[in-house]
Amino acid sequence: MTEENCSILYGHTIITMNEERQVLKNAAIKIVGDRIKEIGTKEELILSNPEASIIGNDNFLVIPGLINAHQHLTGDRLIQSCIPSEIEDTEAIFDWSVPIHALHSPDDDEISATLSLAESARCGITFTVEAGTVAFPEMVLNGFEKVGVGGAIGSWGWDVGNGPYVDSVDGVIERQLQVLEMTKNHSSVKGWVTLVGHNLMSDELLQKASNLAKENSTNLTFHLSPHAGEVSQYLEKTGMRPVTYISELGVLGSHLLIGHAVHIDDSELEVLINSKTAIASSPWAYLKLGQGITKFGKHPEFVSKGGRLALGCDTENAGDTKDLLLTARLFSGLMQEAKLGLDKPTAHYALELITIGAAEALGLKEEIGSIETGKRADIVLIDTSGPSWQPMAPDPVMQLIWGASSSDVNSVVAGGKLIVEDKKCKNLDELSLANEAKSKQEKLLKSAGLDPSSYWPVTTY
């Protein structure tokens, strides 16, 4: 790699999220290729690298690229905010989302993922974990590459019940192997073993999927215990609560990221912590679907006890938006409400959960999540020139979490490349994407026989 690919990035403040949680002033970052090569003073780096391109200005707050630990990139994206909010969450999933997934063509998967990742990039998200409902992984990979961000993808994995891509254990495992092979040499997108989870996986599939992930030094992710009904189903079928049961199967461990785990009791909480199993929490989704996060959720306690947790945005008919800063603010409030006697402000915990803490939960702490020499150059520049940032607070983390939103994101560097500039994705024709998405939404809703307007009158205000 030559110095010809060099750029210098700076702002008035750099929140590094390194081990010491350093906040730097009058500093700059030297990027060579896709890596952070050096961190030093702005004057020295610019003077010693006269041919480097310059990214940034004195209005910018610089933070690491954000990490979305649970996001469905296909399906709901093309019918976003169409599913009625007054129906039960199981009806929203199985009567709306699943039929739409079944109708998705390869092109639908690609434009859905591209739109979702483009929105994510504009919000400062440079790494996204797809939550396990991709029919055409090669098309979703195209979306990652078009936008220029990193992430993790798998493929549909369930062998219980009826639905799109339900298969035998061997068939599900073969789909996962294909994704691992497709991504094995990719610089920024990892293949994960992904199952739908819930009560839609046999013991055999769960154990084989876990072994497959460990054998290939990658991760396993699936959904579990988002609502009380699932706990009842496990108790009726196995006599055990969900986490306890899968622990007995030998599946828990640092390779596993469980999506949700909202309805867990104290004993399950301890099992997850002791096994180093990670949780992806999507609090906005639980609120929209009314799944009991404020009454039953223990995610703040999980974090306070050293549990490995990351935040996600889920899907466009649950979390709806990719604003991870807003998600972090909500989680900061949930921690505040829990009154846990913490050793630092909840805002600091919240920022960790979308940067370095998330990277650790995904097994990627050495690669992403902080601004440090040698790491991938995933960096976000936030414009603090607007009135909402005036005056600047003594604690920039506090102001970032409680006072900012994704609308303040001006530019984004992912893998050393500037992919968002002046709030626009550089690699895409966003107007063409929007027009194509509109026609696909109409076609999908019609094909599935779904009519959102039948649930409420369409009124002109």
Image (tube, rainbow, N blue to C red):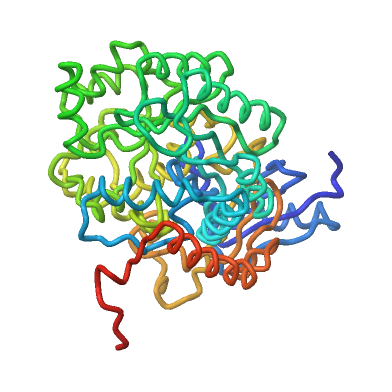
- Which residue lies at the image location 61% right of the left edge and 52% below the top edge? 110
- Which residue lies at the image location 44% right of the left edge and 41% below the top edge? 69
- Residue 318 on image: x %, y %: 33, 54
The answer to whether 190 is drawn above or below residue 43 in the figure is: above
- Which residue lies at the image location 66% right of the left edge and 32% below the top edge? 183
Which quadrant does the C terminus fall into? Answer: bottom left
Q: Quadrant of residue 260?
A: top left
The answer to whether 244 is drawn above or below residue 224 in the figure is: above
The answer to whether 388 is drawn above or below residue 233 in the figure is: below
Which quadrant does the N terminus fall into? Answer: top right
Q: Kindly tell me whether residue 40 is visible in this rendering.
A: no
- Residue 207 on image: x %, y %: 41, 14
Q: Kindly tell me whether residue 384 is visible in this rendering.
A: yes
- Residue 265 on image: x %, y %: 16, 28
Q: Quadrant of residue 39?
A: top right
Left or right: where 44 falls relative to 319: right
Q: Nearer the viewer, residue 171 or 419?
A: 171
Number of numbered tags placed on the structure image = 0
Q: Nearer the viewer, residue 385 or 421?
A: 421
